[in-house]
């Protein structure tokens, strides 16, 4: 019992020290890049992949389920153990003991989260590694969107025999997993570091709750498994899986994972992966253009084949079928989570992918469209 108290106190005292460490690391992102993202994390993540990739179901899902049950059990005990006849001194000691347990638990989870994956939030922005700017003009965005539209329409005509038909993905989900993993392995892009060796992407056991929460997938930082929502349309799976693999590689920020997913799928030889990547990039470009010039955005949309719009509509109808209060709550929660973890724009930071795409295209001229 004494050893337990000492352990709990040490963990509790360790929590403010962790907060101080995070504050220091935020000021020195290149320390994180050199010693963690390109050092310790590579070893830890590869070990995680070798330990969990062979298991056919998601350990990460089970971990989160167990975590929720532990918290609920703790809360239940907190109220069940309250005694009306107990003295105020006894009650105070009990509350203090419970608070110590809670702080120690939070400290442990917080430490493991950062050790296994979370320190990647504090690495330098990707545009610095790529040597590109974050500024772009409306004219540059327009040129990029026009090029995407031309390539999408051409590819759409190759995949269907009528421009009013949407592209159907007649693949098993496991086949799409394999195609995306091979796209990463075969990528010749020297600008993006891809130390990828083991496929570790799985269907989420909680795809229905993920649908109501508005999520296509997630990476569990404690196991480094990539989970995807198997209920989403197959057309969206290539970029979704590529996005989660981007997270697995240590690109923790959403905009950077979206950028990498776009590049990997757009540059691949498989036409279906390219179609997913091109339309994925165009969606963000058109959304950004709409904020700058709604009329021009509508004019660009009018140039797309009707069948391409049907693919967009398919995804929109899927999410509308699951929209509700749960999605709004989770959007708020996740937005705040992103803000805490070095993404001050929260969910709006997804839009920053446009800056990465446009400038990479303009300055590197290496996107194989």
Image: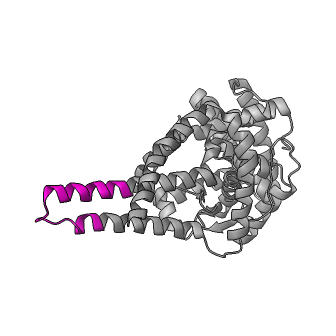
For the N terminus, the quadrant is bottom left
**Looking at the picture, how far across and down is residue 153, in whole percent?**
77, 47
User: How was the colour assigned to the protein in this rendering?
Assistant: one colour
Which residue is found at the position 67% from the left and 69% from the top? Answer: 52
Q: Quadrant of the C terminus?
A: top right
Q: Is residue 161 visible?
A: no
Residue at x 34%, y 65% (from the top left corner): 74
Q: In which quarter of the image is residue 125?
A: top right
Q: Is residue 335 left or right of residue 294?
A: left
Residue found at the far left of this picture: 85
Q: Is residue 49 left or right of residue 74?
A: right
Tell me which secondary structure the magenta stretch mostly adopts.
helix
Q: Is residue 248 visible?
A: yes
Asked whether 88 or 119 is in front, the reply is: 88
Number of disc labels? 0
Which of these two is toward me, 18 or 33?
A: 18
Residue 118 on the magenta span: no
User: Quick check: 205 above or below 256?
Assistant: below
84 is higher (above) or lower (below) than 296: below
Q: Does the magenta stretch include residue 83?
A: yes
Q: Please provide the residue range marked out in magenta.
A: 77-101
At 37% across and 58% down in the image, what residue appears?
101
Find residue 70 and report its horizontal and vertical position in percent: 41, 67
Residue 157 x/y as whole percent: 80, 54
Looking at this view, name the residue that lies furthest to the bottom.
Answer: 56
Residue nearest the observer in this picture, 216 or 234: 216
Instruction: Find the residue positioned furthest to the front.
Output: 2
Return the x and y of residue 147 as percentages of the image width and height. 79, 37
Residue ID at (68%, 42%): 256
Quarter of the image for residue 207 reads bottom right
């Amino acid at each position: 019992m004494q050893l337990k108290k000492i352990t709990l106190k040490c963990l509790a005292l360790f929590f403010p020290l962790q907060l101080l460490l995070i504050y220091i690391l935020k000021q020195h992102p290149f320390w994180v890049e050199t010693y963690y993202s390109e050092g310790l994390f590579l070893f830890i993540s590869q070990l995680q992949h070798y330990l969990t990739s062979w298991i056919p179901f998601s350990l990460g899902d089970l971990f989160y389920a167990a975590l929720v049950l532990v918290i609920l059990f703790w809360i239940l005990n907190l109220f069940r153990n309250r005694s009306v006849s107990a003295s105020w001194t006894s009650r105070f000691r009990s509350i203090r003991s419970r608070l110590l347990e809670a702080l120690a638990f939070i400290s442990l989870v917080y430490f493991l989260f950062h050790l296994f994956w979370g320190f990647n939030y504090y690495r330098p922005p990707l545009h610095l590694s790529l040597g590109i700017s974050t500024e772009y003009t409306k004219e540059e965005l327009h040129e990029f969107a026009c090029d995407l539209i031309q390539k999408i329409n051409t590819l759409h005509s190759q995949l269907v025999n009528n421009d009013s038909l949407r592209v159907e993905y007649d693949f098993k989900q496991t086949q799409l997993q394999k195609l995306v993993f091979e796209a990463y392995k075969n990528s010749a892009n020297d600008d993006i570091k891809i130390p990828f060796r083991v496929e570790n992407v799985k269907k989420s056991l909680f795809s229905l709750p993920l649908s109501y929460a508005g999520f296509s997938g997630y990476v569990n930082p404690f196991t480094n498994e990539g989970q995807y929502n198997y209920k989403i349309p197959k057309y969206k799976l290539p970029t979704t899986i590529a996005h989660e693999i981007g997270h697995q590689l240590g690109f923790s920020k959403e905009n950077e994972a979206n950028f990498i997913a776009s590049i990997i799928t757009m540059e691949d030889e498989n036409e279906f992966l390219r179609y997913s990547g091109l339309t994925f990039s165009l969606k963000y470009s058109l959304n950004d253009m709409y904020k700058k010039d709604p009329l021009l955005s509508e004019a660009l949309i009018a140039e797309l084949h009707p069948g391409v719009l049907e693919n967009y509509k398919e995804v929109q109808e899927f999410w509308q079928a699951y929209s509700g209060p749960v999605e709004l709550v989770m959007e708020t929660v996740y937005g705040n989570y992103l803000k805490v973890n070095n993404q001050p724009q929260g969910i709006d930071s997804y839009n920053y992918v446009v800056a990465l795409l446009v400038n990479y295209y303009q300055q590197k001229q290496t996107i194989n469209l």
